Amino acid sequence: MAKAHALHILVKSKEEAEALKKQLAGGAKFADLARKHSTCPSAKKGGDLGEFRRGEMVPAFDKVVFGKPTLEVHGPVKTAFGWHLIKTLSRS
């Protein structure tokens, strides 16, 4: 079964996610923004979700992690939890 290692930043609004994505494009570090802005407990680890299998995350999240290019920031992606920016580090 497919596995991936990903980082994410979870915020309450699409606008906030888009603003953070612009900061990332301008050279901000993903982990720094995750620690400062993410509402997920993973914020303490710079947004690092560790390794997980396909199907362990909600479908919209899985679709990005397992379907989009790695090492790029994708989103904003809407789930029941809020808005995510997602960076997949590796997939196997």
Image (cartoon, helix red, strand yellow):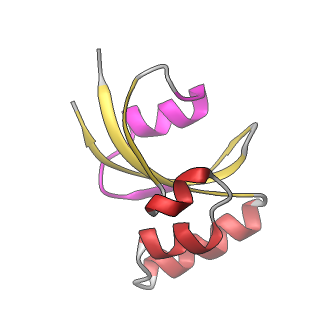
Percent position of residue 81, x then y: 73, 42
Report which quarter residue 76 is drawn in: bottom right
Magenta region includes residue 71: yes
Report which quarter residue 11 is drawn in: bottom right
* Residue displayed at 36% across by 58% down: 72
**Marker count (numbered):** 0
Q: Residue furthest left?
A: 92
Percent position of residue 62, x then y: 49, 31
Q: Residue furthest top?
A: 1
Percent position of residue 24, x then y: 47, 76
* Residue displayed at 53% across by 74% down: 33
Q: Is residue 68 rendered to the left or right of residue 19?
A: left
Residue closest to the eye, 22 or 36: 36
Report which quarter residue 57 is drawn in: top right
Q: Is residue 28 rendered to the left or right of residue 81?
A: left
Q: Is residue 79 rendered to the left or right of residue 60?
A: right
Percent position of residue 78, x then y: 69, 44
* Residue displayed at 29% across by 14% down: 1
* Above or below, comparing residue 51 to residue 30 in the picture: above
Magenta region includes residue 72: yes
* Above or below, comparing residue 55 to residue 21 in the picture: above
* Residue displayed at 74% across by 60% down: 14
In the rendered structure, which segment of residues is drawn in magenta?
A: 57-75
Residue closest to the eye, 26 or 42: 42
Q: Quadrant of the C terminus?
A: top left
